Image (cartoon, rainbow, N blue to C red):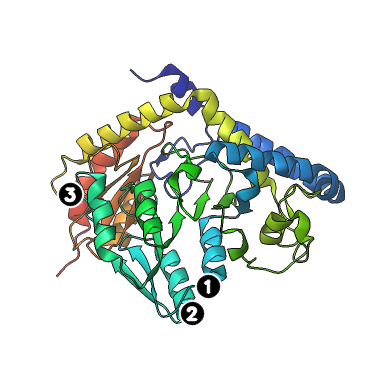
Amino acid sequence: MPDPVLSAARSQMLLDPSVANLNTGSFGPLPRPVFDYATSLRRRLAEEPMDFYVRQLPPLLWHARERLAAFLNVDPRRVVFTANVSVSVNIVASSLRLASPGEILMTDHEYGSLQWCWERAAQRQGLTVRTFRLPLMARDPAEIVEAFVEAANERTRLLFFSHVLSPTGLVLPAKELCAEARRRGILTVIDGAHAPAMIPLNVADIGCDFYGSNCHKWLLAPSGSGFLYFAPGNEDRLQALMVSWGYHFDRSQIDDRDEFGSTPRLRALEFEGTRDPCAWLAIPAAIDFQADLGWERIRARHRELSRHVRQTLGTIADLQLITPDHPQLHGTLTAFRMPGNIDLPALRRGLWDRRIEVNAFERPEGPVVRTSTHFYNTEEEVNRLAAVLPDLLTQGRKSS
């Protein structure tokens, strides 16, 4: 029987009633309280910009920073607000100076644009980029750690990996990977795009050097809300992507709260001139919305829906599950490999014609369809996808 609290909360989500939205993994829809709060902030900004930026913004920004830091279990003086994880990782990749010759090591399932980010960083510094193969259907987290240990060598300067793999939903054992890297003197940078609010997240406990993420996916905050965390010892490694006000500051008070809602160090990294900060300011409202529902209640629903996806789509003959069963190795992203002769654009058109929002994309191993189920989804929406997929897979085969 559906949880009545979560059923009621679904009515607070801004969802198109004609669409089965099974794609939070790309963009999360907004809860109405979050939308209303962000809209009220934008109205205040529109009505009196000078008052908003100069007088209202600083305490709101510090409050948002403290709330996000508490959610992540980190020091707010180590949290830089960004637009998204891509900006976060680009700040790190553009800042770090790594010993050359050497290599940047990453898994073979990293997000494409961030692979390019590290390729550019490596090219600029005379480094190479190397990938190592992940055991995608690992039966135990130790298999993944062993894959990294075997791949690392004396040339490895930095390990970059996703906490949750975008293509398959595999959750990597981040703490164990960072511990092995640290033993070898290897810096760690984590793409945490899918982790906040999908899985329990204690960033300080992971032991990474840098952690970047989005808040617009599972946390259900507005688009344009992301962050970068830097661990102790990495403070002076970072440089702003853009020089603006905040570039010159008093280094004797570099980590003290300032009059701008940040610290001099943080302001230098996140101030980009005039911008709309309301997405950042709405993060506490997004945290409160799900916290009030109860994180364990939400995650229990996540588990129910993930099982339903596996059981329902798993009966379709042309689909092969590629997300592990081990509870520590998967969250609520569930992926299936499709036949190699599928016309992906035609499949995506067919799904959207039926008002089903789900991700289907090409991978080197073959085309993949990926569902992303949050607490507001229903078994009926999953069934709706399962009912149309067999015919779409048959109709979408490329002619030889």
Identity of the residue drawn at 81% across and 50% down: 53
Q: Residues within 10 Å of mark 2 (few under 14, many from 20)?
A: some
Residues at marks 1 and 2 touching, judged by CB atoms closer than 8 Å: yes
Residues at marks 3 and 2 touching, judged by CB atoms closer than 8 Å: no
Tag shown at residue 320: 3
- In the rendered structure, the answer to whether residue 319 lies left or right of residue 250 reads left
Q: Secondary structure at mark 2?
A: helix
Residue 133 visible (yes or no): no
Q: Residue 164: x, y in percent?
A: 37, 49
The amino acid on which the numbered mark 2 sits, given as a three-letter code, is: Gln
Identity of the residue drawn at 26% across and 46% down: 141
Q: Residues within 10 Å of mark 1 (few under 14, many from 20)?
A: some
152 or 79, nearer to the observer: 152
Tag shown at residue 83: none
Q: Earlier in the sequence, mark 1 or mark 3?
A: 1
Q: Nearer the viewer, mark 1 or mark 3?
A: 1
Tag shown at residue 97: 1
Identity of the residue drawn at 62% across and 34% down: 285
Q: Quadrant of the C terminus?
A: bottom left
The amino acid on which the numbered mark 3 sits, given as a three-letter code, is: Gln
- In the rendered structure, the answer to whether residue 107 lies left or right of residue 195 reads left
Tag shown at residue 125: 2
Q: Residue 116: x, y in percent?
A: 43, 71
Q: Residue 82: x, y in percent?
A: 61, 55
